[in-house]
Amino acid sequence: VLFLRRTPRKSSLDKVPGPAAESFLTGHLLKLFDPSGPFHKNLVNAYGQVVKIQGLLGADQLYITDPRAISYILANDNGIFESPRQTVSLGNVLFGPGLGGVSGPQHKKQRKVLNPVFAPGHIKQITPTLFQVGRELQDLLSARVKSDGTELDVLRWCTRASIECLGRGILGYSFGDLDGQNQYADASNTLIPNVGKLRVFVPLLPLLRKLCPASLQRPVISALAAFWPNLKALKHDIDVLSDTALRIYNDACGASQDHLTGDDKNILTMLIEANSTVTAKEHLTRDEILGIISIIMFAGSDTTSNTLVRILEILARNPDVQARLKNELLSAFAGANDIEHGTLVQLPYLDAVVKETLRLHPPLVMMDRHTNEDAALPLLDPVTGTDQREISSIPVPRGTIVWMAIAMNNANEKVWGSDAKEFKPERWLSDLPPKLADAKMPGVLSPLMTFLGGPRACIGYRFPILEIKVLLASLLQCFEFRPSAAHTVHWRLAHIQAPYTENRPDAPSMPLCVLEERL
Ligand code: HEM
């Protein structure tokens, strides 16, 4: 009822073009959350770079590809625009009060302490640790090929490697053998499906959290979970995530008391040290650091391992690309186990393959923001309104959800050229189209929007790029990848894009044929 009352009957968005909704209840949301279908492409082809769509109960939303409009949203993020309250509330419930689970000044304070510890020099130091995990992944796959045959679910092992890279590289913590028991991996795997089973309650979270004092929230959830199996399963996952964060934090506090120096330092110990020197106003509480550990682990694992297996899938389907990449790596490594960070990151074809995959297949295909007040969105390319007049600035009423179309931006033919939707790593080996510079894409890894930009951009974006390069180099030194003979893979949107097969519709997997080439 509240929702209906707040929906204006006549909206300033009435003249923005867009398709009619097929359902008053769910609007276009079901199609929007199926990016493998043609809906996203059709929206842009038929209506242009700003499209009006419908959310729940007929609420107007905007789907935006226009670079200037997206720049404006990101420049005013955490102000006129903000992560929707229910998204932040959900982040807080799942991970605690760290980054994704907080907003406003608290979010700004956390970014201020964290940004310097994610600096390029610190990420670079992690390279030898990542190569060590790469060697463990080589040995594990080799053993699995011998025991299970050449058809393997490479996603399972790449995800374990990714968790270990984050653990050792960023947080100074090891989860143990890559094929040993890992409660964290199991819980983070079932977390989003378990949230999905209770998804009708997610829009109510901000209200429920307001009504129930913080000190009572846990006891109330425990009491309800006793007779509500879906809540019990979700609570179990949340408990595993928060227990893991606590173990990692306690380890790091012990380690930083031993006064680690130089190479022994990791991002977390640096954060704990930096936190001890900031002013009282900037100081992060223990719960905030635990929340930050939890969100780093969750935001950093599947995004990276899904991208890594996406590359392996592309290589399996394009043997010429695989052969060229392998040649570049074999001559750079010349039989050694690892190479210098500077040499690795400058390998041109490796860089091109990674960037081209992140461009065409961003794990997060779109991100939403909510207007806190009335806003006017400037456009780079005017759109034609439903009254046939040109619109160069869109008045957006307070309370509107706007979607930034990351994937469509990365493949926008207007700026990337007519081959924008093709996988062509070579495009990165010569000058990129001049229109890209004119568009001034506001991403932290411009011209890609994959890690977004602005105050909520991916804080760790340098890390997954390095990790993917190291693990890919380690794998291609020993194995050749070919498409699975038994299964067809379909990519679906869970919270991020993930691969599924027809025989395992409930859990992501990436079956590939893995042929060992190591002598
Ligand atoms: C290919 C891999 C990755 C992609 C595509 C990716 C993408 C993104 C994007 C688009 C956001 C912005 C979300 C928003 O606007 O609400 C984000 C946020 C975030 N990412 Fe990543 N990410 C990746 C890997 C990582 C890794 C490895 C880490 C940790 C080392 C990480 C840590 C975070 C954190 C903590 C946030 C929340 C930032 C905030 O709210 O201020 N991500 N990521």
Image (tube, rainbow, N blue to C red):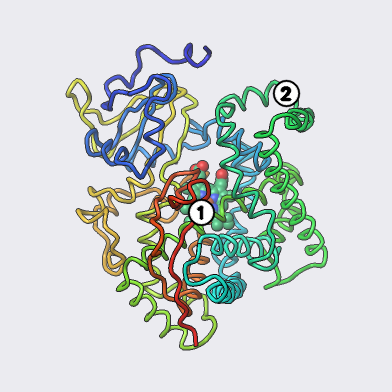
Mark 1, ligand 1, within 8 Å: the answer is yes
Kindly indicate the quadrant of the structure image that contains residue 217: top right
Q: How would you rate the neighbour count of disc 1 (Cα within 10 Å): few for under 14, some for 14-19, many for 20 or more?
A: many
**Image location of residue 307, percent across then percent down:** 45, 58
* Residue 458 appears in view: no
Q: What residue is pinned by disc 1? A: 303
Q: How many marks?
A: 2
Please name the residue shown 24% across and 57% down the image.
434
Residue drawn at point x = 30 percent, y = 50 percent:
411
Q: Is residue 113 above or below residue 200?
A: below
Q: Mark 1 belongs to which amino acid?
A: Thr
For mark 1, give the secondary structure. helix
Name the residue at the left extreme: 388
The 10 Å Cα crowd at callout 2, few under 14, some 14 to 19, many 20 or more, is few
Query: Is 479 situated left or right of 138 in this image?
Result: left
Residue 58's place in the image compared with 334, above or below, is above
- Give whichever of discs 2 and 1 has the lower sequence position: 2
In the picture, the disc for residue 513 is none
Q: Are marks 2 and 1 in contact (CB under 8 Å)?
A: no
Element marked by disc 2: loop
Q: Is residue 138 left or right of residue 447?
A: right
For label 2, being within 8 Å of ligand 1 is answered: no
Residue at the disc numbered 2: 212
Return the residue nearer the eye: 287 or 165.
Answer: 165
Horizontal and vertical percent position of residue 287: 74, 43
Under mark 2, the amino acid is: Cys
